[in-house]
Amino acid sequence: MVSEHKGRVNHLDNNITIYPFKFKHLQHLIDMHDANNSSVSKAINMKTLPKIGYIAYLNDKTPIAAGFLRRLEPCFGQIDTLVTNAYMGSIVRHQGMLAVTDALMNDAIHVLKLEGLICHTSSQDIIKRATEAGFHILNQQIIAKRLR
């Protein structure tokens, strides 16, 4: 189901490569969430992650961004578990995030045939970047219940 997307994005002197997410990338994903003080890392494993995901590396060795695509309803999906490496510079993180989200949006259109995407965030930086990419801010209340 995951497309065989692998691409290079050259920005300034940065050589960024994205790969479909595999088990061998799992520890890098967990480490990025831990570096961002995210409590999400405790729940991350290959069973909880969506099947479609990408990870970006700088010079094929340093992880800089990762994200996943989750189907919510027949026609809508969600960009999920999006994270960047807190130890990298902002330009590299931004380029890695763009490469990952471009690949996810491509799969949303061509693999899952979705009509729309939603994202949840409280980060003003992500909201700004998302609106620049054509996302619209919806003012809704989110209601949640912890099950365990």
Image (tube, grey):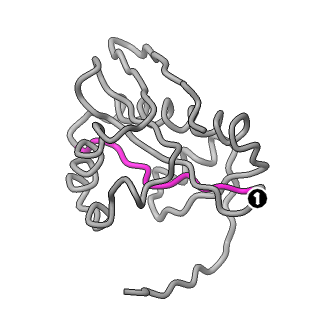
Q: Is residue 117 left or right of residue 102?
A: right
- Residue at 36%, 86% in the rendered image: 148
Q: Using the rendered view, name the quadrant where residue 120 is placed.
A: bottom right
> Does residue 115 show up magenta in the picture?
no
Expressed as whole percent of the image width and height from the top left, the position of residue 56 reads 38, 31
**Front-lying residue, 36 or 71:** 71
Q: Using the rendered view, name the quadrant where residue 34 is placed.
A: bottom left
**Front-lying residue, 119 or 110:** 110
Q: Is residue 124 left or right of residue 25?
A: right
Magenta span: predominant SS is strand
Crowding at dot 1, Cα within 10 Å, few <14 / some 14-19 / many 20+, comes out as few
Q: Amino acid at mark 1?
A: Pro
Expressed as whole percent of the image width and height from the top left, the position of residue 80 reads 50, 55
According to the image, label 1 marks what residue? 74
User: Up-down: is 16 above or below 85?
Assistant: above
Q: Using the rendered view, name the quadrant where residue 27 is placed.
A: top left
**Front-lying residue, 111 or 56:** 111
Expressed as whole percent of the image width and height from the top left, the position of residue 30 reads 26, 51
Q: Is residue 17 left or right of residue 70?
A: left
- Residue at 30%, 38% in the rendered image: 25
Instruction: Give the secondary structure at mark 1.
Output: loop
- Residue at 76%, 43% in the rendered image: 113
**Region of the chain picked out in magenta, as a range:** 76-86
Image quadrant where one finds the N terminus: top right
Expressed as whole percent of the image width and height from the top left, the position of residue 86 reads 25, 45
- How many marks overall? 1
- Residue at 45%, 16% in the rendered image: 8
